[in-house]
Amino acid sequence: LALPTIASKESIIRVYDHDVQGRTVIRPLVGPRLDGPNDAAVIRPRLDSDRGIAIGCGLCPQLSDVDPYWMAWHAIDEAIRNVVAVGGDPRRTAILDNFCWGRPDEPRRLGELVRAAQACHDAARVCGVPFISGKDSLNNEFAFQPADAAVLRAAMARYGLTLNADATRLAIPGTLLISAVALVDDVHRCVTADLKQAGAPLYLVGQPTRPPGRDASGRPEFDPEVAHRTHLLAAELIRDGLAAAVHDVSDGGLLVALAEMAIAGDRGLHVHGFDDWAWEEEELDRSPLLVGGEGAEAGAFYFDEMPALYLIEPRLERYDEFRRRVRTAPSLLIATVEPDVPPHAAEFRFDVPTTSEAIARVPLGELRDIWQAPLRG
């Protein structure tokens, strides 16, 4: 939670006025304290209409060195997840690309760029999301003198990176930023990421998969068709009023997403161990979760940045209908919101993956401080 890429960006977000013209319905920060991260924003262009527009983005440069094709796919999937998570319609979503790359006259860089562009084509076809605009920024490289190489090599080593002995240029990782806009039929049906109901169950909806680079082949298990069906299901649950809170799994993985929902809602959360998971779909492929049964592989499930996954808190008054609907897709009950307690007594409890023994009981206030401190203004 304290990593700069994951820590709260509130001090940066608040530099911008998100209420210009008074048409903002969902803001980037949500919850009782208005400090919790949300997946996307929603605006209402016409005040005489209940229709709105969800705006979100996706960015996964960490996968670029593994395979630019899957880097682009994951960025597109994340952008779609983000607009769906607030109530956007994935069937009426459009996307924009922003390529940031090295020198395209270098054969390897050009090949990587072609791979990313191919993913854009494939994703647009599978998900039915047209590209309506875009831009590129090429030749993002830094040239340095031999005398500077030692300093640069030492700086990179601190982050586990290496520099070729004969290198004189350093390129940025091939990066694709995807922006998404989606229609919202009724802004009153929009949801946010903050937990809302004491004692409510929290479901993971979607097929967990190993990300690229987790095995020797480097090939991911991501199935775009399954991902698309998951987006449609999440959108239907929100549209039909069955979801009280929704958050996608992205930077930092599942455990970070769970912590963000607890922080945003100012509510304690009990994350269950594997033995206590309630599987709604018996056909769910559990192999990515339980490979090795314990240790690094089991624990990695909580930190892998897997695509096409949503955390959904159902509305308690419609819980039975929610359970019936999610049985059509991979889904499991993974956590429970704590009963109402004074804010200072709320805690984030995480059980051992293979037992019900708690390995972490962190006061929610302490968890919030850890998350907010690194970039606090």
Image (cartoon, rainbow, N blue to C red):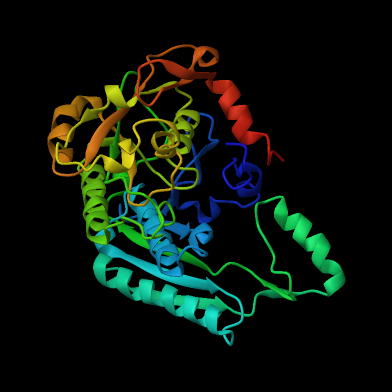
Where is residue 42 drawn, in percent x and y?
41, 52
Q: Within the image, what quadrant is residue 371 found in?
A: top right
Where is residue 159 drawn, in percent x and y?
67, 51
Q: Is residue 95 visible?
A: yes
Depicted 305 relative to depicted 295: above or below? below
Q: Residue at x 43, y 31 (%)?
A: 295
- Residue 119 vs residue 23, the one in the foreground: 119
- Residue 365 vs residue 333, the one in the foreground: 333
Quadrant where the C terminus is found in the figure: top right
Q: Within the image, what quadrant is residue 267 found in?
A: top left
Q: Residue at x 80, y 67 (%)?
A: 149
Where is residue 342 drawn, in percent x and y?
49, 12
Q: Residue at x 28, y 22 (%)?
A: 276
Seen as rendered, the residue at the extreme right is 147
Q: Residue at x 27, y 41 (%)?
A: 287
Q: Within the image, what quadrant is residue 167 found in?
A: bottom right
